Amino acid sequence: MLLISRDEGVRYRDYGSGDVKRMLCGAIALCLIPCAPLYAEGPTINEVKGQIFDAKMLQQTFAAGLKHCNELNGTNFFFPPRDRVLDLDEYHRSLENLAKQQVYNPERKRPWTQEDAAERWEQVQRQAVKDKENCQMVASLPDLEKQLDDLEKTATTAQKKD
């Protein structure tokens, strides 16, 4: 860059390679900012592929629970050891009774306490929500695959136009 001063005449300032790179990156970023909204309107192909992958993995890992999806609505949860769906309210009453009667808790190797019951209650409530979400994710798989096909068709037609 050329700097002119009355007293000293002409001076040159040497920009290091880091300064030039920084200015170049800044200029490129400023040019790309107006283009960002064009691509941020919907999910990208990679995002949809990721969701499809997650849904297919759930199909495999949650296979035993999928046959009970019509019952897994957030008020029930899937209990894999018995391959059963249990009602949250009934399970909560059972936990309270275990704590009142101080029945032996094999996980803790001591009798059930109110704290143990409360902890397990919170855990199964989260499990009920997760089971419901798992069923919804697997149920959305055909829609996700259709969405991916549409996005890929749109991308190929946009590439042909360019």
Image (spheres, rainbow, N blue to C red):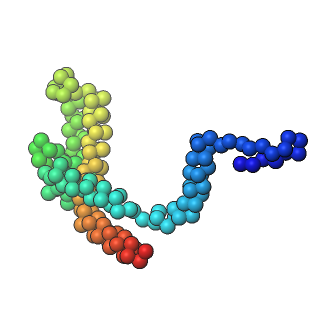
Residue 149: give x, y in percent of width and height.
29, 70
Q: Residue furthest left?
A: 82
Q: Residue furthest bottom?
A: 161
Near-viewer residue (154 or 80): 154
Residue 17: give x, y in percent of width and height.
59, 42
Q: Residue furthest front?
A: 9
Near-viewer residue (22 or 5): 5
The residue drawn where x is 30% and y is 66% is 148
Q: Is residue 149 above or below residue 36?
A: below
The residue drawn where x is 57% and y is 64% is 34
Indicate the quadrant containing the C terminus: top left, top right, bottom left or bottom right: bottom left
Q: Does any portion of residue 94 appear in the rendered image?
A: yes
Residue 101: give x, y in percent of width and height.
19, 28
Residue 150: give x, y in percent of width and height.
32, 72
Near-viewer residue (72 or 59): 59
Q: Residue furthest right?
A: 7
The residue drawn where x is 28% and y is 49% is 130
The residue drawn where x is 56% and y is 56% is 28
- Quadrant hosting residue 104: top left
Q: Is residue 84 above or below residue 145?
A: above
Q: Does any portion of residue 135 appear in the rendered image?
A: no
